[in-house]
Amino acid sequence: MRVNGKKRIKEFMKSHVDSSSALRSLTAIAEAAHWHTSMDIKREFASASFLSRNRVVFNIGGNKFRLVVIAVYVQETLIVTWIGTHAEYAKLNL
């Protein structure tokens, strides 16, 4: 999978250093993957949640952070739409 939004992830890691290891790992796994359905993602990341419009929520760093992406399975692409803390995520209206 191609990950569009790595710059956004890197910027987040600068201000939330404790997310760095988990985000690097998730990015590496995603880039090596060939996910064609939500079940493919669920096999790799059991805690991933799925929203409407192919949005996927990844729990990062023991659920301290959240990463929201749009999965474009046909193009094998993940588009980062939001990244933040669990508390910030709780305030979103997704």
Image: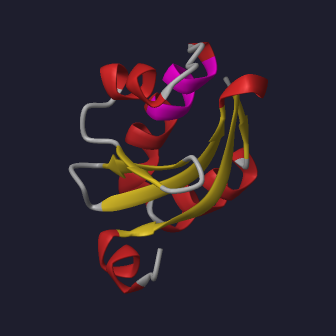
Q: Nearer the viewer, residue 64 or 15?
A: 64
Q: Decide whether residue 27 is among the magenta residues.
A: yes
Q: From which residue to which does the magenta span run?
A: 26-31
Q: Nearer the viewer, residue 56 or 18?
A: 56
Q: Residue furthest bottom?
A: 91
Classify residue 34 as left or right of residue 6.
Answer: left
Residue visible at 40% across and 59% down in the picture:
66
Does residue 19 appear in the picture of this structure?
Answer: yes
Q: Residue furthest left?
A: 62
Tell me where residue 59 appears, x and y as whole percent.
Answer: 32, 50
Q: Nearer the viewer, residue 20 or 41?
A: 41
The main secondary structure of the magenta stretch is helix
Q: Quadrant of residue 65?
A: bottom left
Tell me how many marks there are: 0
Tell me where residue 57 appears, x and y as whole percent.
Answer: 42, 52
Tell me where residue 40 appears, x and y as whole percent.
Answer: 43, 19
